[in-house]
Amino acid sequence: GKIDLVVAHGQTIWHDGRERLSWQLLDPWPIAHRLGVPVCCDLRQADLISAGQGAPITPLADWIVYRAPGRSRLIVNLGGVCNVTWLPPADPPDDAIHRVQAVDVGPCNLLIDGVVRRFFPDRTFDRDGQLARQGNASRIDPSALRRATDLIDRTIQGHRTLGREQFGDAWLDEVVAATGDLSGHDALALAVQIVASVIAKAMARYPADEVVLCGGGARNPVLVERIFGRASNTVRIILSDDLGVPCEAREAMEMAVLGALAQDGVPLTLPQVTGRDQSPLAGAWIAAAVRGQTTL
């Protein structure tokens, strides 16, 4: 089919919302040249210059993709960082969107993959949770879990948005030291427990009728099992797949939604989420060369 536009976010290499700084690696011109369509990029800058933190950027798209009549949902994105979006029931009154909440809650794959690389140098991630499943939870000292989660709480304090800037190599060194003298498999099992604990706190903070897991971490069955184990019996947990959105495609699909909104002149971020004080238009548009003519 015909492509009308492309929205390309790029790879974030640095984000500090408190300093209003965010850099994404992307050259949109080859895309425009090759496909001959307008390209929308630089999605965060308008929010940043309007006193926002530029993130989380997907809650409006979460509302469009995942909202449900008669029930609230908590969208849990298990990416490098775990972020959550709480969606109220999509029922009248029409101002329900103004009650949407979202926040980064802690490390996910940044921690799990980091532990994998420390203890298993020939691996970059734990495919299907095979390594973590070999760990023995009974050998994990509860105080080690408490020390590690306390370290996360101190790290995220005062931050609305999180990333490698907070959870880099030095931070990972502290977590590994806090785990004590564990084998690689047990340390990885502990890392999964830590992430599940972070998500359990988020579920308690934002109670919802349904919890929807998405992101690459949703393909780690051990992590998913631990999340189920920490959840209340009254909450229903499903995968994004169950709603027709492949877990690993959630952010790409939502960027497409944001690009369509930007084309219509709709602000892409929610003030109650990012802290912005205006209603800025968002997205830089790159001209496309079509049949020798330049169009916007």
Image (cartoon, helix red, strand yellow):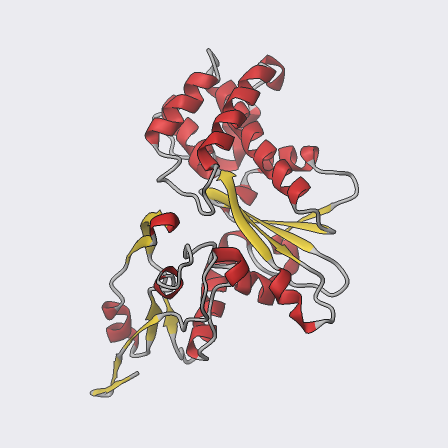
How many numbered discs sit on the rendered protein?
A: 0
The quarter of the rendered structure image containing the N terminus is bottom left
Quadrant of residue 195 within the rendered picture: top right
Q: Is residue 72 left or right of residue 158?
A: right
Residue 81 picture location, percent across and down? 47, 42
Please tell me which residue is depicted at 26% across the width and 78% down the height of the picture: 287
The quarter of the rendered structure image containing the C terminus is bottom left
Q: Is residue 95 left or right of residue 42?
A: right
- The residue nearer to you, when weighing 173 against 116, is 173
User: Is residue 197 in view?
Assistant: yes
* In the image, residue 41 above or below residue 104: below
* In the image, residue 235 above or below residue 246: above
Residue 294 picture location, percent across and down? 23, 85
Please tell me which residue is depicted at 37% across the width and 23% down the height of the picture: 173
- The residue nearer to you, when weighing 204 against 286, is 204
Please tell me which residue is depicted at 56% across the width and 44% down the height of the picture: 218
Please tell me which residue is depicted at 38% across the width and 31% down the height of the picture: 123
Residue 134 picture location, percent across and down? 55, 22
Q: Of all residues shown, which one is farthest toward the right?
A: 234
- The residue nearer to you, when weighing 162 against 227, is 162
Residue 221 picture location, percent across and down? 59, 37
Q: Of all residues shown, which one is farthest toward the left?
A: 292
User: Is residue 140 in view?
Assistant: no
